[in-house]
Structures are given as C-alpha cells and as structure tokens.
Image: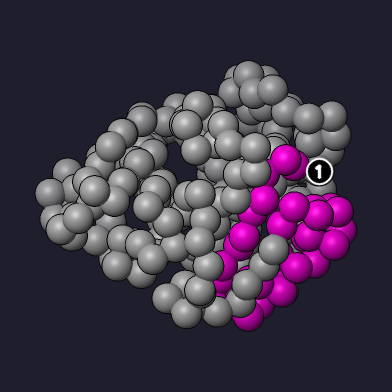
Amino acid sequence: MNLAEGLAALDLDLPAGAGEKLAAYLALLAKWNRTYNLTAIRDPEEMVTHHLLDSLAVLPFIQKSALAGRQEFNLADIGSGSGLPGLVLAIARPDWSITSIETVDKKAAFQRQAKIELGLTNVSIHCGRVEDVNATFAAVISRAFASLGDFVRLAGHLSSCLWAMKGAYPADEIAALPAGWRMSASHELHVPGLDAQRHLLQLEKI
C-alpha cells in the first residue's frame, strides 16, 4: 500500500502539505537507514504501513481525549527511535508541542536532521534516558517501548496520563500494573494494509 492510499483509508483531517512532509520523512528515513540501520524494515511499502500508518492510527483517539482539547497540548514520545510516532504526529498536528526522548545517538541525530529538513518547529529532541528527564507533560506516548509496568516506572514522573502502543492485547501486563495506576481505556487500532493486531492503551495515575 502506498502512502496516498493509506492516508485515504485512515480518513484523517491533516493540514495542507502533511502528505508531502510524510513522504519526505519516509524518504529521509530510507536514506539514513542504508547507512545507520535505524529500522529492520527496508521495503518502502512496509515502511508506510508499519511506521507511518501505524503511528497515525492513534491520532483520532488522542484527539478525542480531554487532554488534547487543551489550548496548548504537549506530548512526550519516549523511546522514540526514528521519531515514531512523535515526528509523524508532529507533522499531523503542528499545533501540538512534541518532545522526543531517545537514548541512541544515531537515532536522535536522524530526528534532528528530519526536524531541520521538514521544518518541524513544534518538535524538541532530547538524547538521553527518560528517567533523567525533569519535565511535565499533558501526556506521554510510547511505541513498542517496554512492558506496561516498566513504562509506568520509567515515565510515570512525566505525566499522569500514559498512552502505550501495543500489538496483541497485553492482559498479563495490565494485570501487573504498579499500584497507583490503572488502565482507563483500550482501543483496537485498524492500520490500513497491516494484517496484525494493534492496540492503544491509556494508563492513568489514580
């Protein structure tokens, strides 16, 4: 599936020029990936479904949350890798403030280059460990980052609302959430062209 088909299938209300920026992001990722091995996925169509559309599929649910209705919505993406979903969400919602937190130097360097080339003025990139970040955010998101328990332990100081992007529904991880936290919402995601389970879980501090 190509990007235009995928965006049409998701039926998102994206700002003018977002499709071109997403395509440019994908081209830059493919270019850097040949040298720096940022992602194991190398097929361009798989990059569209597994990276871009997978990241964009969470957008309607986050937009509907009460938090995103704030005048200034700041979101942290931890363990962001090549900027997924953070940079993709920054392209889709230029009115949101996105902070990307990544420990691996080459991945953070790629994100800095993408920020410059794509003109993403709403993005801040922090290269370091999430537990060393001393800031607060309306919400934090992670994609294939860690178990839910570790996510809470590592990022719970950043926000009282955590969004976890998962594959299959992680019932065991939900049952083992640390004291003081609960799952407040679970959404099954439908990613165009991706024949795999995807879920977005919202965790809240009690």
* Foreground pick, 197 / 62: 62
Q: Residue at x 72, y 40 (%)?
A: 95
Q: Nearer the viewer, residue 47 or 117?
A: 117
Q: Residue drawn 35% across and 62% down?
A: 156
On screen, residue 111 above or below 120: below
The residue where tag 1 is placed is 21
Q: In which quarter of the image is the N terminus?
A: top right
Q: Please report the bounds of the magenta region as a residue range.
A: 94-123
Left or right, residue 153 beside residue 91: left
Left or right: 97 in relation to 171: right
Q: Residue 197 at x, y = what percent?
A: 35, 36
Left or right position of 86 against 65 = right
Residue 61 image position (x, y, % from top left):
47, 30
Q: Which amino acid does label 1 sit on?
A: Lys
Color theme of the render: one colour
Magenta stretch: includes residue 98: yes
